Amino acid sequence: MHPLLGYVDRWSAKPGETIKLMVSSRDGAPFEARFARIQCGDPNPRGPGYRETPMAHPLAGTHAGKDQRTHLGSWIEIPSLDLAAAGDRLVICATIWPTTPAKGRQSLVSWIGTDGVSLSLDVEPDGATATLTVAGKTARVATGKKFLERAWYDVWLVVDRAAKTLGVGQRAREIHPTFDDEGSISTTLAALPGLGAGRACLAALVPSDVAGKPSCHYNGKLERPTVWAGAMVEAALGQQRGAVPRSGEAGLVACWDFAIGIDTLSVTDVGPGGFHGRTQNMPTRAMTGAGWSGAEHRWTHRPQEWGAIHFHDDDLGDVGWTPSLEFAIPADWPSGLYAVHLKSANGFDNVPFVVRPGAGAPKAKVAILLPTVSYHIYSNFVRPGWGRQNIARAKEWGAIQHTPDENPELGLSPYNYHSDGSGVSVATMARPMIDKRVNHFEMMDPAEYGSGCYWVNVDSYVIDWLTRKGIAHDVITDHDLHAEGVELLKAYNLVITCQHPEYHTTEMLDGLEGHLARGGRLMYLGGNGFYWKTVFHKEAPYALEVRRAEGGIRTWATEVGESYHAFDGSYGGLWRRVGRPAHKLVGNGFSAQGIYLGFPYTVNDAMNDPRAAFIRKGLESELRPGAQLGERGYMGGGAAGHELDRADFRLGTPRHALVVASAVVDHPQFKPVNEDRLDHYWPLPLEKLIRADMVFFETPAGGAVFSVGSMNFVGSLPIDGYDNLLTRMMTNVVQRFADPTPFG
């Protein structure tokens, strides 16, 4: 892990509010903190240049360091599990779907008593295993039967005090011809265990120290772990395949029914002892169980068929670092993008945050809406080799060098796969998000002079542009919009989105639609926006969930029967698939994807429409049909590139919309999005699909929308010191959109 890293507990705050900053400094080295308001985050010396304004703060200066670490792997913590009721015969059963059975010891159910006796039922390369430690002596027994990956099994452990034996077994739910994957075995015990009060873990090995972290994390689905007293194995297995036992069932000690509380962090024991637990590090819930019938796909309608949880040895939730600083936002700090810069003898880091206008304070007429939900989803996107590729240029530019591939302890992004090959569906911001930094070198740019910027750095171009043009503006975030909806936007005539606002919650879309419905204006300055649905966890607001259902450009797809979010039960996937396409909101939607390479737009005849007169004001001799815009840019060398959006009236583009400019990309590395194709033919000529459309339309309430349809677009704003044809045109749009005079 990088020697100095930090994160904050919230993306934004108002003057007077407090932000908690968590810092890990290797070997506890002291660190310096300083604060700055960011004008431009791009470290490229040939670009607009990194610029900031130092901001005085009482907590600027040197602080004591603390070495704080992360722990990967999910599990269920059971603080109390008393096995005294088991008497002379204890049987533990569970249903499993292992995904890496050959990887090593992976504990399914583990328990440690107050007297030090420990017991575990595990998946190992030599099959189901049982391990019992008494007075420092360990007995282990294994079936010797290898598990198949991604197949359902019932497994069990038996401690028979009367016979002085420890037994273990496994049985497949389906017969696998030619595979010898079933069996049971027992061994004689040298010492009998005392079974009484203790604590347990599910899907990991319980630590000997109550303050410690578990080990031997399990990869795969786990369903209905159950503890019986006095039961015979066949009877216990029969119960495992039937209905969930009731609390008064004879011999029942504990049964954890994962179908209860799927949208929570809680795990319920339906047994008489109520040995309830809590998930740790965000395992994936609402997973189909062994008895899923396929008759229903929404888990809220028949939750008993989604009684499995998928655990991973690289899951991560809240890393749980203690705060190093709690800094209040001074009353005189204006709204904007800020960063706290950290420096120690071992390294440096910075952590961005946003200052919102204070309660009751005057607000600008323009708000820049930073896509922090998309930052959150993409955070720590591991791309192997990027660290080695980027380091030389990062050093040359004096930029931050952090890359997720070289910091695996910080977890993954929903653009990655877990170690067992399943897609990552949960993103956490309760950790250092090291690829969301200012003055950060992110990727090699194909343009010789290019910056290769992404995320907060490239979005700072919008801040820099408005600042240089003297256009007053506030900065707000997606997280604010999710929490406050249209109320957040009521003070603003114009809301400007940034380069890549791809992920939205229902509350966010409702807020933007409400803004337009009251006559507000919206400028969408990116591509591939308003694409995927995402959901916050009601108990863990640092966690966002994505279910990649049906179509869409995606790195992985949900398994059959698992397309509904665990966090709220709503259907996942593309907003287009649930009746809220981007075309309806902003006039264009994701159409094609390609490499990080940019091309110019060509002005269309619609630019001469009288409704577009404000766009070409003072530029009439230049903004004529056939003229080009954005021939250069600090993202890929041109304004139209990487991910492109097109207008399409069939998909919801308003019928009166004007497509004032377009960029048709003819390059072998650009392809249409797969949701547009039903068979092996594309529904339209490729020049109709691999394109970026610049769209303008008025709304019924006197507002308006302007969308550019390209992820690379904002990279062309800073060319020639923000004094090029494209930027002058966009300045016209901002000035008219900020003017309260109704359109129409």
Image (tube, rainbow, N blue to C red):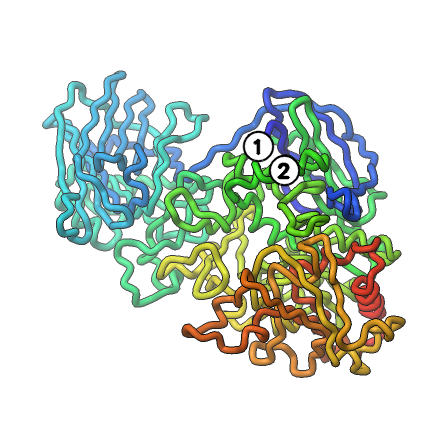
Q: Is 151 situated above or below 604?
A: above
The answer to whether 159 appears left or right of 424 in the picture is: left
Whichever of labels 1 and 2 marks the residue nearer the N terminus, that label is: 2
Q: In which quarter of the image is residue 625?
A: bottom right
| Residue under pointer 2 | 7
Specify whether residue 15 is in view.
no
Residue 321's label in the rendered image is 1
Q: Residue at x 23, y 38 (%)?
A: 92
Which amino acid lies under the numbered mark 1 shown in the image of this protein? Trp
The answer to whether 550 appears left or right of 696 in the picture is: left
Q: Which of 646 and 497 is in front in this view?
A: 646
Which amino acid lies under the numbered mark 2 shown in the image of this protein? Tyr
Furthest residue to the top? 136
Q: In which quarter of the image is the C terminus?
A: bottom right
Furthest residue to the left? 163
Q: Distance between the residues labelled 1 and 2?
A: 9 Å
Does dot 1 land on a helix, a strand or a loop?
loop
Counting other residues with Cα less than 10 Å from the Cα at mark 2, is it few (<14), some (14-19), or many (20 or more)? many
The mark closer to the camera, 1 or 2, is 2
